[in-house]
Image (tube, rainbow, N blue to C red):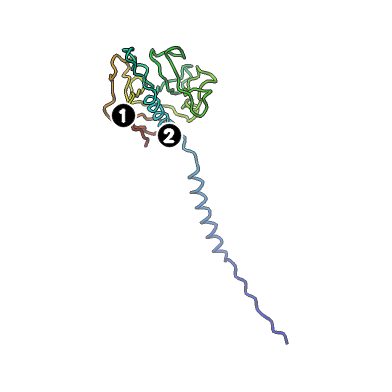
Amino acid sequence: MKTSKTITRKAFTMLELVFVIVIVGILSYFVSASFQRNTIIEAADQIVSHIRYTQHLAMMDNKFDANDATYYRERWHIHFSADSSANGNLVYWIISDKNQNAALGDTAEYAKDPLNTAIVLSGDSSLGNNRNQNLDLTRKYGITTITNNCSAGGRIFFDEIGRPYDDNTSFPATAPHQNLITARCTIVITDGTQNRTIEISPETGYVRHF
């Protein structure tokens, strides 16, 4: 005589399924939020990286020349300005420019882009296809305002030991150690809804953003 066996199957209740769906929804929200772009932080990261690169160039490419009394004017510097086309965009470039020439010449040298040496580290539209368009902060990141408390004239220089200098609107400088930055200074970028502060320390030239 055969005996029947009762097979018991376990399953989720409706309440358990709803609970799982809610948990998965919450987790997916936080994961997706963590992957959203924050363009102002990206812009600050890029600027900090390029300030450090400017300092590196100044230390590696020592401009000292005993036969040139104004050698210090050729120091590498980063220059924040409006685009030369008057389109309202905010740009910057890295340059060694003894006479403050507007274009490349015998006394002006733009830094090459380390990732693509066919272009230079300038966002200004006057350079056409030779420029790095990422350095057009308005076009790339939507930056609408730059408040540069480190430099009255928009330029931050570095000497052969990495110390930062303000051009103080008196560029070209008239002495090797003119306008040495002696206190922490800031550059604030804004996209209309949020801002980011970039800070440069005196002496060391250490830079960070917050």
Q: Residue at x 50, y 52 (%)?
A: 27
What kind of element bears circle 2?
A: helix
Q: How far apart are marks 1 and 2 (CA)?
A: 17 Å
Rendered image: mark on residue 185:
1
**Closer to the N terminus: mark 1 or mark 2?**
2
Mark 2, residue position: 45
Q: Which residue is drawn at 26% across and 27% down?
A: 182
Residue 192: horizontal and vertical position, in percent? 43, 31
Residue 19 placement (x, y as % from top left): 52, 60
Q: Is residue 167 left or right of residue 49?
A: left
Describe residue 46's horizontal placement relative to residue 168 as left or right.
Answer: right
The residue depicted at 58 percent of the width and 66 percent of the height is 12
In the displayed orientation, state which residue is furthest to the right: 1
- Residue nearest the observer in this picture, 161 or 24: 161
Determine contact: label 1, label 2, CB under 8 Å: no
The quadrant the C terminus occupies is top left
**Vertical position of residue 119 compared to residue 48: above or below:** above
To which quarter of the image does residue 193 belong?
Answer: top left
Q: Which residue lies furthest to the front in this view?
A: 66
Where residue 139 sits in the image (x, y, percent)?
50, 26
Identify which residue, 29 or 18, lies in the foreground.
29
Q: Relative to 11, is 156 above or below?
A: above
Taking the spot 53% from the left edge, 23% from the top edge, the residue there is 118
